[in-house]
C-alpha cells in the first residue's frame, strides 16, 4: 500500500495524476474526494497490473482544482482512507503593461513620465526594474501594480527601462525606451566684436539643449574648420570661434548654425578690425599762441581704423562746444577747435 503525498504542485493547465497502490481481496472500490466532495467517476481509473488507483485532473486551474484530495477504499471486509494531499496550482508570470502603451516614448524636458506594469502570477513573482542595466526602485507598488514615475523628466532620465518578473514557473520581461529632448536655448547670443589689427578675436555663444547641440561656424557663408587661423572649441554649453591675428580680410559677418536633431537656430555677428588712432599736428600744439580778443584755432589730424572719436579737453576736463568754442571735423580726420575772441582764461 502507498499513500498520497502530503503536498503536490502543478502548473495551471498542466495535467496531474494522483496514484495510490492498494491491494485487497476482494479488490476494493475507490471513491475520490475533492474538498470532501466526491469526484466524478470519469476521471478515475485502475491499473490492474500495478494495483494502482488513479485520479487524473485535466487542465487544472486555481479556482477549479486547488485544494485537498483524499481517497476512500471499501470492500466487503471493511474500508480504509488515505491521508489527504493538498494540491497547489502555480500560475506563470503574466505582465500587463498599463503605461506607456508603446515601447518607445519621446518626451521634452519637464514633461511627466510613468512606467506602469501589472505583474501577476502564483506564486507572486519577484519583480525588478532596471534602467540601462542598473536597478532602480519603484515609485509605488500596490498589489500587482508596479509604478515608476518621474514628475518632470531631465536628460539623465533618458534610457531603457526594463521590468523583469520571475517565479517558480516562468520569467517574463517588458521594457520601454525613453528619449528626452530639450529645445535649444541660447542664453548668451553672439555679439559684434572690435579687434585691433594683429590681435585675436573671439566670438562666444552659450546654448543649452538635449541632445547636446552641434555648432557649425561660417564666415561670409563659407564653412570654417579648425586651422591655425580659426580655432573652434565646444565645451559644455559654451561654443567659441577664435580668429587669430585679425587682419582686414577677416572683417565680415560670422554665422553660427546650431542644431541637435530636433531643433536648430542661427546666430550672426560682425568682426571689426581696427588700427590704433595716430595723432598728427600741423603745427606744435604745445606752443600755440594767440592775441587776446582775436580768434584762433588748434588742429590735429587723426588716423585710424575705425575712424577715431575725438574729445577735446581743457585743463583735464572735457570741453563742450558753445558760442566761443566750436569743434569741427573734416573727412581727412582733422579735428579743429576754434576759439572765438581768445581770453586770458583760455590759457
Image: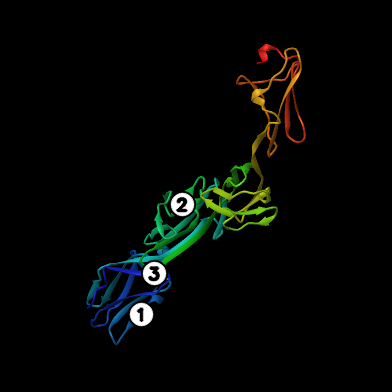
Is the residue under label 1 in contact with that under label 2 (CB below 8 Å)?
no
Q: Residues within 10 Å of mark 1 (few under 14, many from 20)?
A: some
Q: Residue at x 76, y 15 (%)?
A: 294
Reading the image, the residue beneath label 1 is 45
Residue 308 locus on image (x, y percent): 68, 34
Identify the disc placed on residue 11: 3
Does 194 sit left or right of 7 as displayed?
right
Does 132 sit left or right of 100 as displayed?
left
Up the image or down, 209 lies above or below 306; here it is: below
Q: Residues within 10 Å of mark 2 (few under 14, many from 20)?
A: some
> Quick one: label 3 or label 2, which is nearer the N terminus?
3
Q: Residue at x 63, y 53 (%)?
A: 217
The answer to whether residue 105 is visible is yes
> Quick one: label 2 or label 1, which is nearer the N terminus?
1
Identify the disc placed on residue 147: 2
Does 197 sit left or right of 77 as displayed?
right
Mark 2, mark 1: which one is toward the viewer?
2
The quadrant of the rendering that contains the N terminus is bottom left
Q: Residues within 10 Å of mark 3 (few under 14, many from 20)?
A: some
Instruction: Give the alpha-carbon distance from disc 1 to disc 3, as whole Å.
Output: 22 Å
Viewer-nearest residue: 229 or 142 = 229
Amino acid at each position: 500500500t502507498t499513500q498520497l503525498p502530503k503536498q503536490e504542485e502543478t502548473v495551471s493547465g498542466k495535467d496531474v495524476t494522483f496514484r495510490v497502490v492498494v491491494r485487497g481481496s476482494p479488490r476494493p472500490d475507490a471513491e475520490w474526494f475533492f474538498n470532501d466532495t466526491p469526484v466524478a467517476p470519469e476521471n478515475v481509473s485502475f491499473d490492474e497490473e500495478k494495483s494502482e488507483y488513479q485520479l487524473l485532473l485535466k487542465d487544472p486551474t486555481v479556482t477549479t482544482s486547488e485544494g485537498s484530495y483524499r481517497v476512500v477504499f471499501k470492500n466487503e471486509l471493511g474500508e480504509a482512507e488515505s491521508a489527504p494531499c493538498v494540491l497547489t496550482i502555480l500560475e506563470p508570470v503574466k505582465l500587463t503593461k498599463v503605461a506607456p502603451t508603446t515601447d518607445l516614448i519621446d518626451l521634452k524636458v519637464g514633461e511627466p513620465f510613468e512606467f506602469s506594469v501589472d505583474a501577476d502570477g502564483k506564486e507572486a513573482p519577484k519583480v525588478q526594474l532596471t534602467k540601462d542595466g542598473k536597478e532602480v526602485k519603484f515609485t509605488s507598488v500596490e498589489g500587482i501594480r508596479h509604478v515608476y514615475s518621474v514628475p518632470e523628466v531631465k536628460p539623465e532620465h533618458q534610457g531603457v527601462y526594463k521590468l523583469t518578473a520571475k517565479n517558480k514557473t516562468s520569467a517574463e520581461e517588458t521594457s520601454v525606451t525613453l528619449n528626452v529632448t530639450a529645445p535649444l536655448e541660447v542664453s548668451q547670443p553672439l555679439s559684434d566684436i572690435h579687434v585691433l589689427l594683429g590681435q585675436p578675436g573671439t566670438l562666444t555663444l552659450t546654448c543649452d539643449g538635449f541632445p547636446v547641440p552641434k555648432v557649425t561656424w561660417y564666415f561670409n557663408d563659407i564653412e570654417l574648420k579648425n586651422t591655425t587661423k580659426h580655432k573652434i572649441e565646444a565645451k559644455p554649453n559654451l561654443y567659441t570661434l577664435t580668429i587669430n591675428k585679425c587682419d582686414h580680410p577677416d572683417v565680415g559677418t560670422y554665422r553660427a548654425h546650431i542644431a541637435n536633431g530636433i531643433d536648430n537656430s542661427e546666430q550672426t555677428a560682425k568682426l571689426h578690425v581696427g588700427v590704433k588712432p595716430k595723432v598728427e599736428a600741423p603745427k606744435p600744439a604745445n606752443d600755440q599762441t594767440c592775441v587776446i580778443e582775436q580768434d584762433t584755432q588748434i588742429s590735429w589730424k587723426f588716423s585710424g581704423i575705425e575712424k577715431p572719436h575725438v574729445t577735446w579737453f581743457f585743463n583735464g576736463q572735457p570741453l563742450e562746444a558753445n558760442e566761443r568754442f566750436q569743434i569741427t571735423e573734416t573727412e581727412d580726420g582733422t579735428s579743429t577747435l576754434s576759439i572765438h575772441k581768445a581770453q586770458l582764461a583760455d590759457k
